[in-house]
Image (cartoon, helix red, strand yellow):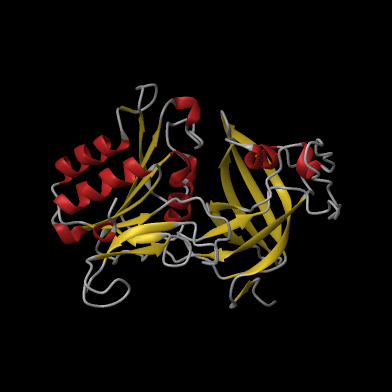
């Protein structure tokens, strides 16, 4: 049987909802089924159309005469609608033995688009574009992978853990409070999503309601102090709130540990067209374009990233 993973560039796909179940307060695990999907890797993302694709497009002429109220019609004008696709990191990908692909996305309800996603039912159809962006570079066999995720930055860490079979890895998962931790705890106090891949997990909550009481960056620092690793012994991977990632990159830089950062930016297209996801980075050679003579330039999170080396980023 031919593999469901195809070697091709990004494309548009129509996926079917397999499950869309709540994990904790405000977070859902969405599993989408597709006949085929291009080869993907941890760190990459998809753009999801958070609206009904079956809604017919309607072209109407609106009277904008001065002094007269505008008569609006159509759901896209009369009610909030997510007109643009939303970017979501992949939390996992499974190539099924019987054929087909399942993609896993973990989303949090924060607006009209994710509210629409939370209402999806089994069998509903969802339009996606992907896979997009670059990917994490896996560690050497003799290195320890340290996966640091905060909030909705945890999903790409789950996908990365699935690719580290047999390798030493520790996951650090942070949340504001226990009921906003988008992970599944087992009866023996392990985290199912990481434990199935043999990855130890250290949980932190800002309010101390579960695990380490404090920021996930503090938990990382304490672990590094106890481990006493040499600079080349580990690679740190991180995704989450920008302040958290900035601190993780600083911790890594101070200890001369390699750090790969999956940045988060609002994206309208995900393909480098709209230029809306600019991020400031350090140039390796100031004499070369863009901006010759300057030691920095802008890159796009969607096409140059979302994964950057921590030492490159100018926060």
- Horizontally, is 30 left or right of 219 in the view? right
Could you tell me which residue is drawn at 28 percent across and 67 percent down?
A: 140
Q: Nearer the viewer, residue 203 or 278?
A: 278
Could you tell me which residue is drawn at 86 percent across and 52 percent down?
A: 60
Q: Nearer the viewer, residue 136 or 301?
A: 301
Q: What is the x, y in percent for residue 303?
A: 47, 67
Q: Quadrant of residue 203?
A: top left
Q: What is the x, y in percent for residue 87?
A: 56, 53
* Figure quadrant of the N terminus: bottom right
- Horizontally, is 218 left or right of 180 in the view? left
Could you tell me which residue is drawn at 27 percent across and 55 percent down?
A: 314
Q: For the view shown, which residue lies furthest in the front direction?
A: 66
Q: What is the x, y in percent for residue 108?
A: 56, 38
Q: What is the x, y in percent for residue 279?
A: 38, 57
- Horizontally, is 67 left or right of 137 in the view? right
Q: Using the rendered image of the protein, determine whether residue 66 is visible from the camera's viewpoint.
A: yes
Q: Using the rendered image of the protein, determine whether residue 121 is visible from the camera's viewpoint.
A: no
């Amino acid at each position: 049987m031919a593999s469901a993973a195809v070697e091709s560039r990004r494309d548009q796909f129509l996926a079917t909802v397999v499950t869309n179940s709540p994990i904790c307060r405000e977070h859902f695990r969405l599993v989408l089924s597709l006949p085929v999907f291009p080869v993907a890797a941890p760190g990459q993302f998809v753009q999801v159309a958070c609206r009904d694709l079956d809604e017919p497009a309607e072209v109407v002429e609106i009277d904008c005469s001065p002094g007269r109220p505008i008569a609006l019609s159509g759901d896209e004008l009369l009610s909030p609608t997510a007109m643009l696709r939303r970017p979501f990191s992949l939390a996992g990908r499974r190539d099924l033995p019987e054929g087909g692909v399942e993609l896993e996305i973990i989303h949090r309800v924060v607006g009209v688009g994710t509210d629409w996603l939370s209402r999806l039912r089994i069998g509903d159809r969802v339009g996606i574009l992907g896979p997009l962006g670059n990917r994490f570079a896996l560690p050497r066999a003799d290195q320890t992978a340290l996966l640091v995720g905060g909030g909705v930055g945890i999903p790409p860490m789950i996908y990365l853990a699935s690719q580290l079979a047999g390798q030493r890895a520790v996951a650090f998962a942070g949340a504001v409070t226990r009921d906003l931790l988008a992970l599944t705890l087992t009866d023996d106090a392990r985290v199912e999503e990481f434990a199935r891949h043999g990855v130890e997990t250290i949980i932190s909550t800002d309010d101390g309601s579960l695990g380490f009481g404090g920021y996930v960056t503090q938990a990382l620092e304490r672990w590094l102090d106890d481990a006493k690793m040499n600079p080349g012994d580990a690679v740190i991977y991180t995704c989450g709130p920008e302040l958290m990632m900035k601190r993780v990159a600083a911790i890594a830089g101070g200890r001369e540990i390699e750090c790969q950062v999956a940045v988060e930016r609002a994206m309208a297209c995900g393909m480098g067209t709209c230029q809306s996801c600019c991020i400031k980075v350090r140039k390796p050679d100031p004499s070369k374009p863009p901006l010759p003579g300057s030691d920095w330039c802008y890159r796009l999170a969607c096409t140059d990233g979302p994964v950057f080396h921590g030492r490159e980023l100018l926060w």
